[in-house]
Amino acid sequence: MIGTFRSDLEPEVKITEARILDVIRTVAPTARLLRIGPVDFNPPEWSCWVVTVTDDERDSLAADTELNERLAVVAKAGFPPDSFTFQSDETVSRDYEGSWFYAMR
């Protein structure tokens, strides 16, 4: 049923996020994740935003084919996000007046 509350998904998503972050931090130790989308409704959908400090770091991660393949494998082993997006604090500060809300719209 669409719109059914699914509190059971939160632990699975958190485990998946931790695994994703472990993979990313092998290349970008200061990276963090932001979760976008509802995971507590059926059907669950969420997007994983990988946040870096600089544009150069973001671009390097996004272009790293091996890293992206590893992320796909890790995500499939848990509760996978619908998508990965790479973004930097530098871009959000410069282009969105520091607002992640506007950056995600």
Image: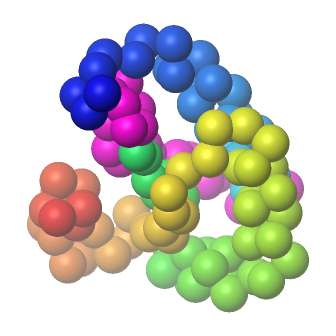
Is 30 or 6 nearer to us in this picture?
Answer: 6
Residue 32 seen in render? yes
Which is the main secondary structure of the residues drawn in magenta?
Answer: loop
What x and y, as percent, mark residue 53? 50, 63
* Quadrant (top left/top right/bottom left/bottom right) for the N terminus: top left
43 in the magenta segment: yes
Residue bounds of the magenta highlight: 25-44
The answer to whether 94 is drawn above or below residue 51 in the figure is below
Question: According to the image, what is the colour scheme of the structure?
Answer: rainbow
Is 74 or 58 nearer to us in this picture?
Answer: 74
Q: Which residue occupies 74% across, 72% down?
A: 68
Is 26 or 72 nearer to us in this picture?
Answer: 72
The answer to whether 4 is drawn above or below residue 26 in the figure is above
Residue 81 as seen in the image, left or right of residue 35: right
Q: Quadrant of residue 94?
A: bottom left
Residue 25 as seen in the image, left or right of residue 43: right
Q: Quadrant of residue 63?
A: bottom right
Residue 84 as seen in the image, left or right of residue 64: left
Is 54 or 23 nearer to us in this picture?
Answer: 23
What x and y, as percent, mark residue 33? 52, 46
Q: Which residue occupies 17% across, 64% down?
A: 105
8 in the magenta segment: no
What x and y, as percent, mark residue 5? 31, 17
Q: Which residue occupies 26% across, 33% down?
A: 2
Residue 4 as seen in the image, left or right of residue 23: left
Residue 22 seen in render? no
What x and y, as percent, mark residue 74? 80, 49
Q: Which residue occupies 32% across, 36% down?
A: 38
